[in-house]
Image (spheres, helix red, strand yellow):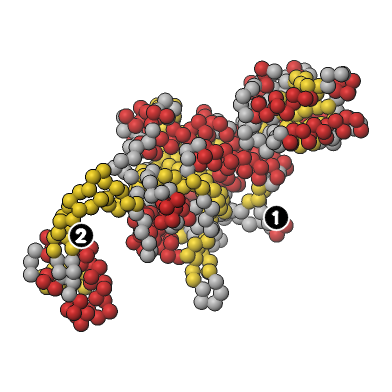
Amino acid sequence: MSEHEHAAADESTTEATSEKLVELAKRRGYFFQSSGAYGGVGGFYTFGPQGASLKGNVEDAWRDRFAVAEGNMEIDAPTIMPEPVFEASGHLDGFDDMLVECPDCGESHRADHVVEDNTEYEDAESLPIPEVEEVIAEYELVCPSCGAGLAGQAVETFNLMFATNIGPGDSDPGYLRPETAQGIFVEFPRLKEYARNQLPFGVTQIGRAYRNEISPRRSIIRVREFTQAELEYFIDPEEDDPDLERVADVEVTLYPAAEQNAEDGSPIETTIGEAVEEGVISSPWVAYFLGVAKPWYEGVGVDMDRFRFRQHLSGERAHYAADCWDAEGEIDGNWIELAGFAYRSDYDLSKHEEYSEDRFTIFKQYDEPKTVERATVDPDMSYLGPEFGGAAQDVVDELEALAARDREAFAGETVAIELEDETHEIPVEKTGFAVEEQTEAGEHIVPHVVEPSFGVGRLVYTVLHHAYREDEVDGEQRTYLALEPEVAPTFVGVFPLQSDDDLETTAREIVDDLRGAGLSVTYDDSGNIGRRYRRQDEVGTPFCVTVDYETLENEATTVTVRERDTTDQKRLPIDELAETLSAIRDGELAFEEL
């Protein structure tokens, strides 16, 4: 069987295993463990020339769909932020994993991973710590490193954030951000001005995040430094609705919490419109972004037969999420999280307003002015000052807050407030309490947030895994990556058929022309032509152009263009090559139509 007679490769392909993929990734420059010269360090990976290009193409595709096409703005915030940011966000107290330490070798392990790897439990992360300890004892689970029994060992929480200091000497404590989201939330007071104080609006960010994983594993799937692509979409929950008609017919595989909890539960096949109508997805906004994401994932090369959206169980939802769905891809029989789609309500902005000195609200203009009753206080400071000293202003703040939420508290002769865990009775006549009619043109509201959060490294791994193929060409085994042209690191390889000055000159002129047209091109004149094809196949280059003697001999100069997956070959005029290949890359033309 000759190269150009090779049949459709999908009929004789085999899927990747992670071992094969990791070996290919290292050999061909996709990714490898960092600091190898010093023995490597767990949880940190370097993306090589091919991997950095693939990763960048995935990020560009995400930016085009979730920032440009949706009309959202993009920022780039620092990766280190001061401690008060994470105190407000809840990460200091609620960003923990479960840790169990081996009594013999002293190695620490994620307790939920130990359970999931050795029992039928699939989502041990959602279990409370006492139950995880019971499962470890019941199944007599052992240390993955040395085999010592873990029964009876305490499972403890471990905060995943990397701590640092900002400045020298008695510097301010800070942390490497565990998510890019907080860089958006803390800048909301300024970002809302760029959005002209009009809801809804979205802010995107692509950048590094850091989590001090207890046991990083599975190559770039679980690491300590990674790239996120996140969208924070700010809405008025009472007025803003998504355009569900745009995604209503998108077909999806959903795995709701109810099905996960059922004894015979399984994923369901439906559409976004039906899922919202039937209440399977409670938030229309989450549903909208699931509908946007599904065809995007397919476009960058995720196998839709190994893709689903799974709803978080109540025990595994983040502290800020009212509801959350994960996009998941199947790898070696396991489902891994690719993205989270969370309805964060007003949690983040309310917390930052509470802890900071800025306003995290939007002024909502009424259609017509409204007359409303407002409870106000105008305390007698000649009384509060001597009575409470330096805490007098705190008393005023408590009285104002109490009047706003419970005016009946001022119905008696005294009103009780809590101050530093002590109750104080204050004469109502000294508070200046009154209920007044006010005409208002609008009100300040705290927007709610919908967040699609994508893990870029995990997606790169999944795209490579789902693109891995093995087949036979001309009696030889071939490995290739069936990457989508939109994300492939190199779009076309250009070869002279043999080592010949005229062939090489023409080939290099073609390289310049194709690069001038904006195509990613590699030039290769090393080894026989079959070996060069195999190299490009293995890194996923969709097309190869070969300059041969027919190119030089014919008056109408043509070259051979070879398609990666089928190995079919066609001759195309050189003067039409850039235009034709650009049209194929942009989806305007199919190779088989040539």
Name the foreground residue: 488 vs 215. 488
| Label number found at residue 404 | 2
| The N terminus sits in image quarter | top right
Q: Quadrant of residue 27?
A: top right
Amino acid of disc 1: Gly
Q: Is residue 421 left or right of residue 11?
A: left
Q: Position of residue 323 (x, y in %)?
A: 36, 43
Q: Residue at x 52, y 51 (%)?
A: 75
Q: Position of residue 42 (x, y in %)?
A: 61, 55
| The C terminus sits in image quarter | top right
User: Which residue is under mark 1?
Assistant: 36
Name the foreground residue: 224 vs 154. 224
Q: Position of residue 149 (x, y in %)?
A: 49, 55
CA distance for labels 1 and 2: 61 Å
Query: Viewer-nearest of labels 1 and 2?
Result: 2
| Label number found at residue 6 | none
Amino acid of disc 2: Ala
Q: Residue at x 43, y 48 (%)?
A: 195
Q: Is residue 216 left or right of residue 265?
A: right
The answer, for residue 268, to whether it is visible in the render is no
Mark closest to the chain's N terminus, 1 or 2:
1
The answer, for residue 38, to whether it is visible in the render is yes
Name the foreground residue: 484 vs 93. 484
Q: Quadrant of residue 474?
A: top right
Q: Residues within 10 Å of mark 1 (few under 14, many from 20)?
A: few
Element under disc 1:
helix
Q: Residue at x 14, y 59 (%)?
A: 436
Number of numbered callouts drawn: 2
